[in-house]
């Protein structure tokens, strides 16, 4: 098994640990993705309409998205987000 090369923290040069930042969508958590521009709006959210909040939904095609890997420095807490190419 090949051990992945972990990035070093830009602040303190310690090796960072991989993880992810979950995104709550309705009633489930999913990994965040990077999505190519442009950003398309799909209208107001139900929560926004019910409570008079200024919130809109974005149109997201998860097939176009790339999963984001979050690296965190265990010493200083710096976070680095990376959207690696498929297969990397």
Image (spheres, grey):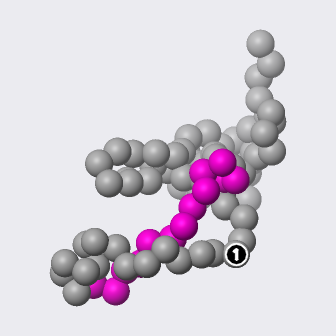
Q: Position of residue 34 (x, y in %)?
A: 66, 58
- Compared with 47, 60 (above or below) is above
Q: Which residue is at the far top?
A: 1
Q: Residue at x 69, y 41 (%)?
A: 15
Counting labels gives: 1
Q: Quadrant of residue 79?
A: bottom right
Decide if residue 35 is in sight here.
Answer: yes
Q: In this image, 30 relative to 55: left or right?
A: right
Q: Quadrant of residue 6?
A: top right
Q: Which residue is at the far left?
A: 51
Q: Which residue is at the far front?
A: 42
The secondary structure making up most of the magenta span is loop
- Compared with 31, 10 (above or below) is below
Please tell me whether residue 61 belongs to the stretch shown in magenta: yes
Q: Residue at x 27, y 84 (%)?
A: 53
**Nearest the camera: 62 or 8?**
62
Q: Secondary structure at mark 1?
A: loop
**Which residue is the site of mark 1?**
38
Q: Residue at x 53, y 77 (%)?
A: 41
* Segment tinted magenta in the rendering: 53-65
Packing grade of label 1 (10 A; few <14, some 14-19, many >=20) is: few
Decide if residue 76 is in sight here.
Answer: no
**Nearest the camera: 26 or 76?**
26
Q: In this image, 22 relative to 14: left or right?
A: left
Quadrant housing the N terminus: top right
Q: Position of residue 36 (x, y in %)?
A: 72, 64
**Nearest the camera: 17 or 34?**
34
Q: Residue at x 80, y 33 (%)?
A: 87
Q: Position of residue 72 (x, y in %)?
A: 58, 48
Q: In this image, 46 relative to 10: left or right?
A: left
Quadrant housing the C terminus: top right
């Amino acid at each position: 098994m090949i051990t992945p090369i972990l990035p070093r923290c830009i602040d303190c040069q310690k090796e960072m640990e991989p993880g992810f930042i979950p995104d709550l969508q309705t009633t489930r958590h999913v990994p965040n993705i990077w999505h190519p521009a442009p950003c398309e709006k799909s209208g107001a959210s139900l929560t926004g309409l019910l409570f008079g909040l200024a919130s809109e939904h974005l149109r997201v095609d998860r097939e176009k998205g790339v999963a984001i890997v979050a690296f965190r420095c265990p010493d200083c807490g710096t976070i680095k987000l990376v959207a690696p190419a498929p297969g990397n």
